[in-house]
Image (cartoon, rainbow, N blue to C red):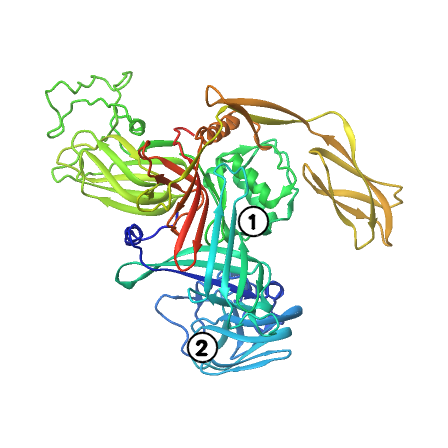
Amino acid sequence: MQSVSQVYKQSMKQILRNRSYMKVTIGVINQEAQRTAKVPAPDRYTYFSNLLKPFDNYTVDYLYATAEQNYSAVDGSMLFLPRSPDNVVFNSGIVTADLLGSIEISFSTTYDIKGLTIEFGKTYPVEFMIESDYNTVHVTGNSSGHFVTEEIFPQATFIRITPQSMVNGQGRFRIHQITMGLGIYFDNKKIISSSLKDSVSPISEDMPAIDFNFTIDNQDKVFDIDNEKSSINFLETGQECIVEYGYDIEDNFTEWVPGAKLYLKNWSANDKQMKCTAVDRFEYMQGSYYKGNYYPEGISLYDLAIDVLTDAAVDPREYWLDGYLKTVIVNNPLPVATHKEALQIIANAGRCILSQDRAANIYLKSSFIPDMTATANDEAYYSKVGNILTADTKAAYADAQNKVTTVQGNQFFLPRTESGTNYLNTGYVSEVVADASGLFSINPVITIRLEAAFKCFSFTVVFGGNAPREFIIHTYLENTAVEVVTVTDIEKETVISREFAEFDRMDLEFTLAPAHNRIMVDYVEFGEVTDYILERSLDLSKIPNGNKLEKVKELQVIRTMYNQSGELKELVKELIQVSDIENEFIVNFSNASYGYSCTLEGAGAGQNAEIVESGAYYAKVIINGFIEETEINLIITGYEYAITSARVTQPLNSTGTIETWGNPLVSSLAHARDIGEWIGAYMKADREYDINYRGDPRIDANDILFLDNDYNNDMQIRVSEHTLSFNGTLSGAIKARRFINVDNT
C-alpha cells in the first residue's frame, strides 16, 4: 500500500469526495538508438569522464572541481580530482577536454529520432547547435540545465552538440544524461477513460501482472498515423508509460500518488480517439534461464535470484531482494524456464511474493509473519528478556526500587543465590537502576530481531513496575536506520499508533525513568498489519459477493531429492556446423545431469572439443582445430541424476480434498514443513470476495485490508486483484481472500 499523508486518508473518507486527477506520460524514446549510442574519439574528453553512464539513466551525484571560469565552488559540494584515472570512482558524465568543446554521439546504423532530452548540469550552454545527418538546430536563450527539444532527426547516424556560449563563460561542455526522445503527456483534459488492473498471487502460484488500458481524445487529430511528424509514428513496443493519480485535499492542494511505471504494448488511433495498452516488465522477461545447477553444499535463494536476474540482464538498481532469502539454503537445480518463471519458483520456495513496485522495480518480499527474538544489552540475573514476546502473565520479584515493592502478596522474594536457581516466569528487568534524576549510567536497550522485514501500524509495550518517563524506538532494515520515534506519553500499557515503515530490527532505548527504578517490560506486541478499512456504508458501491471455497483436508508438499547414479549415458549426439569462427556451442539436456565429457565423431589430428562451462541442464562447448566449415557429430556423455520424491503432510481440516504442492527447489523436511504451513494458512482461509468500491490509488494487489462485516469483527482480507478505473472520477473493484493471521508461519 502506498504511503500518503494523514490529511489524504481523512479526505478520502468524506461522504462527498474532492476532485481526482490523472496523468499519463509515454517516453517516446528510440530504444535501439539509446542502447547502441556511443561516444567516439574518447581522447577528446577528460580522463574523469564517463562515456557510458549518460546513456543509461545514471545521475551525477558529485562534481569534481576544475579550473574553469565561475565553476568550482568551495562550499563542500565538489571533490578534488584524483591524480590518476584509475582512482576516478564517481560518475561525472561526458566532459570535454577543451573549453566549449563539442560532444558527438554515434549510432551503429541510421535511426529516426523524435526529440532529445538532455541534462547539462549546473553549467549549461546558453547558445548551442545540434547537428545530425539531415537536420541542424540552432538554440538560443537556453536558461536551464534541463533541455528538451521536439525536433526530429531523421536517418541519423550521429548527433553532435556544439556550444557557442556557456552560462559560466569559458567552461567545459558537459552532458550528465541524454535520452534519444522525449515524453508525451496526457492529463484530465485528454484522458477519456482508463483501467489499471494489478494482480498478485499471495503464494506465488501465478505470475504477477499489471494491465493498463487508456483512451485519449484525438478529435484534434494530433495522433494521426498519416502525419509523418506525429508522435504516434515514433511509438515503440516497450517504451515507458508512467501513470500518476492526484487528489485534492485541504487548501486546494493536490496530493499525487504514483500509479505505475509500465511498458507500452500496443496502440491504435482514429479521428476521435487513441487507445493504448501498457503492461508490467515481467511481460517482456521471456528469455530462458537454463543454468540451473545442483549445489551439494547448498546455495541461498538470495544468490540464486541474483544469478537469474543477472542472466536476464536486469540492472542491479532495478530489483530488491528480501534479506531473509539469504537464510533459505537449497541444493536442487532450477529447471529450464523463462527468467520470470524462475523468479516465481524462487519466490514460492522462499515464502515470498514476486511483484513489481510502482517504479517498475522487481521485488521478492517475504509474505509471512516473521519469527522474532529479543535480547538486551543490560539485564538482571533473574530477567528473561525473551519472554516479552509472549502474552502470558509475568511474575514479579520484590526488590529495592522506589515505590515498586508492595505487601499485597503479588510479588515474590528473590532466591539468595544467582546460579543454579530456576527463576519464575519474568519479563525483562534491567540490571542498571536510574539515579535520582531518572537517568542511567548506560541506557538499557532491548533489541527485537525479525527473521524477515515487517510493516505494522501500531506497537504496544506493557510495563511491569513503574513505567519509564521516556524511551526511543529505533528501527532498521538490513542494518540501515529507518526511523527514530521518541515516546514520552507513557502509561502502564502504552500503545504507539503510527505507520511503521518496513523494518527487520527494532531497538527500544530507555532514556528516562522514575528515580531509583529499573526498566521492567512484561510484553511487547506488534499491532495490525493494516489500517485500511472498507466501510460498507461509506466505501462500498454494493454488497460484496462472497464465495465459499471447497475445504482442503490436507496439503501434501512434495520433496524432491537428487542422487548420483552409476550409469554413464550418451546424453546428446548432435550434428553441428563448425569453423574457425563458429566454434562455440551451447547444448541443452532434457534431464538434470552431471559428470560430462565430450568427443567429436571422426575428428582428425588436432581437432577436439572441450566443455568450458556447464550446469545440470546445459554444457558450453568450444571446438578446436577446424578452419573450413565442416559438419561433424558432437557427442556428450554423462550421468543423469537419480531423482526420488517424498511427501510431507500438513493437516488443515477434518474433511475436504487432498491437495499436493510441488516446488522443484524443496528437498529438506524442514523446508517442506515451512512451505506447508505457509500455503496451508492460505488454503485454510476458504472464502473469497468480489468487492466494488469508490476507488483509491493507495491500494496494491497483496495488500491486507479490513472489510466491514456483520458477523466477524475486524475481518481481514488479502487483495489478489485490484482494478482502478478513471473517467473523470475514480471507481474500483477488488478480488480478495479471507486473511488469517497464523502464528509461526
Residue 613 position (above or below residue 680): below
State the residue in front, 452 or 192. 192
* Mark 2 closeness class: few <14, some 14–19, many ≥20 residues within 10 Å: few
* Mark 1 closeness class: few <14, some 14–19, many ≥20 residues within 10 Å: many
Q: CA distance from mark 2 to mark 1?
A: 47 Å
Image quadrant containing the C terminus: top left
Quadrant for residue 271, please give it: bottom right
Q: Mark 1 falls on what kind of element?
A: helix
Instruction: Quickly name the residue at label 2.
Output: 68
Instruction: Quickly name the residue at label 1.
Output: 282
Q: Residue at x 72, y 33 (%)?
A: 595
- Mark earlier in primary sequence (2, 1): 2
Q: Is residue 32 left or right of residue 549?
A: right
Query: Horizontal and vertical percent for residue 373?
Result: 36, 31
Quadrant for residue 298, please give it: top right
Query: Please, what is the three-letter code of the amino acid marked with disc 1?
Result: Phe
Query: Horizontal and vertical percent for residue 410?
Result: 16, 20
Residue 288 position (above or below residue 517): below
